[in-house]
């Protein structure tokens, strides 16, 4: 489904990108997400639904990722303009591999990865060390190595996670990985109890997440388009969290029929309550902000954990040219 064919020029907030676009025919832009449509993508859908991108001069089409879709590869091949990145580890690995992908904004100030436990079995982060933890292979080679190096977790207590919560539900001595806005809700609905949820960001995992990526050539050749898309996206995220998000929610559900309004509402509630989008430096610098010191801190932790090698040109992974513009800073309710 093409989601860019909604043309309304109403815009709840002014967009600070280059104004010259607004007087020209809309510029087609394709943005690829990294998974199926969900509330965690809501700000991008918001700017399609309420005309924020159009007011800036862009006709944005959002194409969903998924199990069999690699939108990042499509961006490398020049078939899409922007991509929703994961965390900064992905960006660092692009530098390591010599791939000219650049992060231009970070929507999530806190990584939404969580470890989940049964109530009474682990009531603190340190209590998790007494459990068997179900962690997937990607998590084991990334954040779990940091958990081992910095917090004293062990490889022996980890078992592979198969993306099925049944083994966790059946065994109180097990914990499992999850996404703040997804698995806790699914477990409560299926098993009838609210699990204890521990955000790895609150334990010091300092990576940004849900970044906006583009190619270095796009920045060099068309910086106005990049600025317009970033500004529109940041405004969209403010509007999605604090305004009327019904239009965006409708687009999400149309794109992903398995996504229900109750799931969307829970995810949005968690993002707001836990400061996933709007916390830390974003309180002063605005939604989407990034800073050198936060990114350097995360790189240093990944080196200390053995995930990355020293000497990587980590600053090549991002630019601050298009963000830190205080979107929503002075008008949050």
Image (cartoon, rainbow, N blue to C red):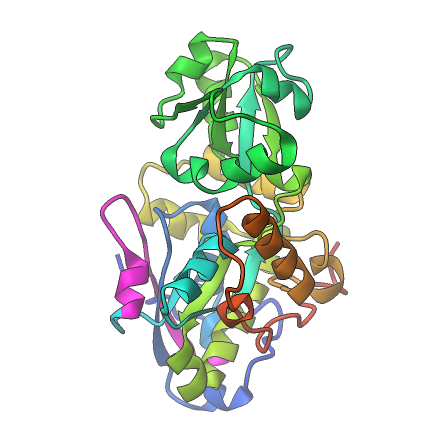
Which residue is depicted at the point 42% across and 58% down? 93
Give, as a single range, the part of the protein colored magenta.
56-76
Look at the picture and state if 43 lies above or below 214: above
**Residue 158, image x and y in percent?**
46, 23
Which residue is depicted at the point 41% across and 36% down? 260
Q: Quadrant of the C terminus?
A: bottom right
**Residue 209, image x and y in percent?**
53, 52
Which residue is depicted at the point 37% across and 56% down? 33
Q: Total of numbered circles in the picture? A: 0
Left or right placement of residue 58 versus residue 328 in this view: left
Q: Work out whether residue 270 or residue 242 is closer to the camera in this orientation and state it.
A: 270
Q: Work out whether residue 69 or residue 189 is closer to the camera in this orientation and state it.
A: 69
Look at the picture and state if 89 lies above or below 125: below
Q: Work out whether residue 236 or residue 288 is closer to the camera in this orientation and state it.
A: 288
Q: Is residue 177 visible?
A: yes
**Residue 37, image x and y in percent?**
38, 48
Q: Is residue 243 visible?
A: no
Look at the picture and state if 227 lies above or below 66: below
Whether 62 is among the magenta residues is yes
Q: Quadrant of the N terminus?
A: bottom left
Whether 279 is among the magenta residues is no
**Residue 120, image x and y in percent?**
65, 10
Which residue is depicted at the point 65% across and 55% down? 297
- Quarter of the figure with residue 114: top right
């Amino acid at each position: 489904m093409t989601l860019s064919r909604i043309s309304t020029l109403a815009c709840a907030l002014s967009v600070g990108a280059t104004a010259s676009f607004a007087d020209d025919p809309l510029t087609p832009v394709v943005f690829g997400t990294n998974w199926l449509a969900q509330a965690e993508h809501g700000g991008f859908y918001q700017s399609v639904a309420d005309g924020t991108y159009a007011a800036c001069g862009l006709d944005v089409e959002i194409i969903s990722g998924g199990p069999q879709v690699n939108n990042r590869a499509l961006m490398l091949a020049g078939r899409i303009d922007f991509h929703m990145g994961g965390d900064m580890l992905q960006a660092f690995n692009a530098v390591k591999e010599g791939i000219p992908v650049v992060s231009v904004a970070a929507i999530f100030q806190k990584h939404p990865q969580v470890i989940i436990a049964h109530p009474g079995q682990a009531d603190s982060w340190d209590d998790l060390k007494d459990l068997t933890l179900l962690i997937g292979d990607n998590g084991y080679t990334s954040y779990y190595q940091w958990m081992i190096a910095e917090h004293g977790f062990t490889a022996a207590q980890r078992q592979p996670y198969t993306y099925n919560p049944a083994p966790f539900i059946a065994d109180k001595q097990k914990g499992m990985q999850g996404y703040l806005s997804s698995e806790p809700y699914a477990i409560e609905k299926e098993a009838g109890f609210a699990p204890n949820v521990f955000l790895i960001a609150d334990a010091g995992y300092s990576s940004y997440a849900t970044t906006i990526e583009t190619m270095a050539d796009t920045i060099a050749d068309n910086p106005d388009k990049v600025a317009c898309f970033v500004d529109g996206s940041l405004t969209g995220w403010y509007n999605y969290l604090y305004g009327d998000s019904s239009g965006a929610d409708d687009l999400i559900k149309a794109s992903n029929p398995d996504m229900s309004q109750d799931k969307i509402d829970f995810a949005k509630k968690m993002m707001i309550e836990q400061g996933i989008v709007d916390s830390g430096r974003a309180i002063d610098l605005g939604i989407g902000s990034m800073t050198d010191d936060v990114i350097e801190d995360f790189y240093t932790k990944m080196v200390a954990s053995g995930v990355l090698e020293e000497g990587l040109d980590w600053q090549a992974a991002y630019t601050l040219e298009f963000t830190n513009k205080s979107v929503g800073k002075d008008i949050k309710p």
